[in-house]
Image (spheres, grey):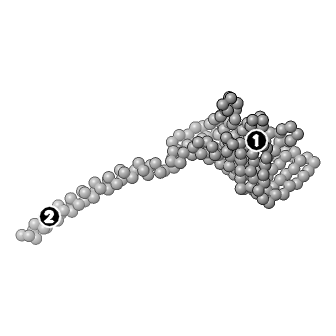
Amino acid sequence: MLSDRLALAFPVFVVALLTALSFWLEAVVQQASPRSAALRHDPDFIVDNFIASQTSPEGLLRHTLRARRMTHFLDDDTSHLEQPSLDHFTDQGLEVTARSDHAQMSGDGQVIQLSGNVRLTRAPVANQSELVLLTENLLVTPDKNFARTDAPVVIRNATSRTDAVGLEFDYNTRQLELLRDVRTTWQSRLSRP
């Protein structure tokens, strides 16, 4: 008799255990889903033909950022840019333009990491010819008018070509510091870069 009762109770116990287990699994999955969605690197919006400009408090144009496409990611608050172009205007009116294949911009827009065929051009000023800088990656801080890289760079102007590894460039002072392995070739006239 006792064995008959145990035989009848065992399937009921198994069904109750499986039911409780299924409710527990459903609760775990429901709680994990919102968290895992927030951790995924999915775009929350995409803008084609993106253009953004910033002016000074006096209304003077400081910089303009353009891109073929801007994709914003909510998980890390970054924006990925395709074919970006960043134009800087300093207090002296000096224009510096940076272009590349791709870029990643911080959420506050304070840091832009350009990558792939980076070309930075400083417009001619006074007695200085146009300056062109070529590299594979360049970190730009637009509000500070500053650019930096640790990668190999080629710098060209009307009369010279300089190869180096790493540089820091302050647009306001026009001071360019080459970090290491610097080699310069001077010529009376170089073809345009």
Circle nearer the N terminus (2, 1): 2
Tell which of 92 and 114 is nearer to you.
92
Image coordinates of residue 177 in percent, x first then y, are 78, 52
Tell me the tag on residue 9: 2
Image coordinates of residue 135 in percent, x first then y, are 74, 52
Q: In the figure, residue 24 lies in which quadrant?
A: bottom left
Image coordinates of residue 28 in percent, x first then y, are 34, 54
Q: Give the residue type at disc 1.
A: Asn
Query: Residue 54, relative to residue 82: is it above or below?
Result: above
Tell which of 69 and 34 is nearer to you.
34
Report how far apart the C-alphas of labels 2 and 1 lie in the structure: 84 Å
Q: Residue at x 17, y 61 (%)?
A: 12
Q: Residues within 10 Å of mark 1 (few under 14, many from 20)?
A: some
- In the picture provided, is 103 more to the left or to the right than 125? left
Q: Residue at x 62, y 47 (%)?
A: 104
- In the picture provided, is 69 more to the left or to the right than 138? left
- In the picture provided, is 83 more to the left or to the right than 133? left
* Residue identifier under label 1: 172
